[in-house]
Image (tube, grey):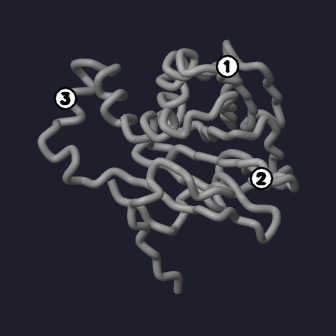
Amino acid sequence: MELDSMLVGEGTAFIFPSEDKGKVRFHCHEDDEEYADVDMDQLLKESWQEGMALYSKNIQEFLLELNHYPLYVHSMSGSGKINLSPDADSSTRFDRWNIYHRLTITSEEAFLHYFPKAYQDAYNNESILFSSEKTIEIEETNNDFYFKKFRLAFPADARNCFFLWVNHDGNGFDFVANFSDHPYQHETIEIEDVE
């Protein structure tokens, strides 16, 4: 596992409508050596569930350690029939390519039930955002990228707020928060040079 300061989804899957981009910002991705002895293609053929569980282990453990409920799963999809859609509290169709779904998770038991579905949606290239926030604004302008973008804004009050966006291929995540007490707080974040 490696952490760096460059957020993969910023500008393509989400934007910040203000200068407040959180107290903590990092991208977590899998170290190639972590799975060097695993033939992932073979594992996925033999057992899709085991392959997904291995691939999603760091994301699931991170969210479990955050221990924040209710937890909201926001998705932007090109389909009304993704894994999360049957259980969504809310669904909105913006146009034929952008359907928004929101799912509320109220306990660890519910999280363990729904997380594999949300992760599989991310793995299948849906835009999946876990957050402490029930309401997420959507950027209404046309997007060069496939889906409309989430607008990540921190609340005016002092309550803790976070956003965790899962990479479209499921091999990592972006984490942004207005608090520093999180499961990877003692890990080193590599600073990316921006030219």
**Label 3: which residue?**
42
Q: Which mark is residue 151?
A: 2
Q: Which is nearer the eye, 136 or 99?
A: 136
Q: Which mark is residue 85?
A: 1
Disc 2 marks which amino acid?
A: Arg
For the residues carrying marks 3 and 2, which lies nearer the camera in this image? 2
Count of marks, rendered view: 3
User: Mark 2 to mark 1: distance in Å?
Assistant: 21 Å
For the residues carrying marks 2 and 1, which lies nearer the camera in this image? 2
Tell me which residue sits at (16%, 47%) in the image: 36
Tell me which residue sits at (68%, 14%) in the image: 87
Q: Secondary structure at mark 3?
A: helix
Image quadrant where residue 94 sits: top right
Query: Upstream in the sequence, badge 1 or badge 3?
Result: 3
Residue 192 position (above or below residue 77): below
User: Mark 1 to mark 3: distance in Å?
Assistant: 29 Å
Tell me which residue sits at (77%, 19%) in the image: 89
Q: Secondary structure at mark 1?
A: helix
Query: Upstream in the sequence, badge 2 or badge 1?
Result: 1
Dot 1 surroundings within 10 Å: few (below 14), some, or many (20 or more)?
many
**Which residue lies most toward the bottom here?**
195
Q: Which is nearer the eye, 36 or 24?
A: 24
Image quadrant where residue 128 sits: top right
